[in-house]
Amino acid sequence: FKAIPGSGWAMAELMAKGASPLAEEFSMYRFREGRFIDESVAAGVAH
């Protein structure tokens, strides 16, 4: 998984307060809407 420690903070906020502006961009709706994350810039190595 390409998770970072910050994802723990985002998950805690989501559980405590609901969706935050930080996490909204990563909702499951992004797949239906075609808003994908460019994996080529997320990896530390070339694929």
Image (cartoon, helix red, strand yellow):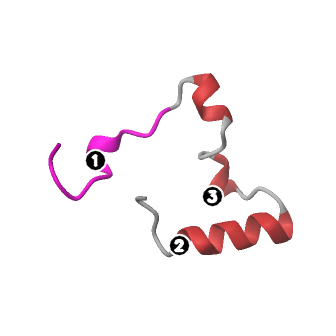
Quadrant where the image shows the C terminus: top left
First of labels 2, 3 by sequence position = 2
Of all residues shown, which one is farthest toward the top? 33
Of all residues shown, which one is farthest toward the right? 17
Q: Residue at x 34, y 43 (%)?
A: 39
- 10 Å crowding of disc 1: few (<14), some (14-19), many (20+): few
Q: Residue at x 73, y 59 (%)?
A: 20
Q: What amino acid does circle 1 point to?
A: Val
Determine the CA span between mark 2 and mark 1: 18 Å
What residue does disc 2 label?
6
Q: What amino acid does circle 2 point to?
A: Gly
Determine the CA span between mark 1 and mark 3: 19 Å
Instruction: Say whether residue 43 is left or right of residue 33.
Output: left
Q: Position of residue 10 (x, y in %)?
A: 65, 67
Q: Is residue 38 magenta?
A: yes
Q: Main secondary structure of the magenta part?
A: loop
First of labels 2, 1 by sequence position = 2
What residue does disc 1 label?
41
Q: Position of residue 6 (x, y in %)?
A: 53, 72
Q: Position of residue 34 (x, y in %)?
A: 54, 24
Instruction: Say whether residue 13 is left or right of residue 18.
Output: left
Query: Which region shows up in magenta?
Result: 36-47
Quadrant where the image shows the N terminus: bottom left
Q: Is residue 2 magenta?
A: no
What residue does disc 3 label?
22
Q: Residue at x 72, y 73 (%)?
A: 12
Q: Position of residue 3 (x, y in %)?
A: 46, 63
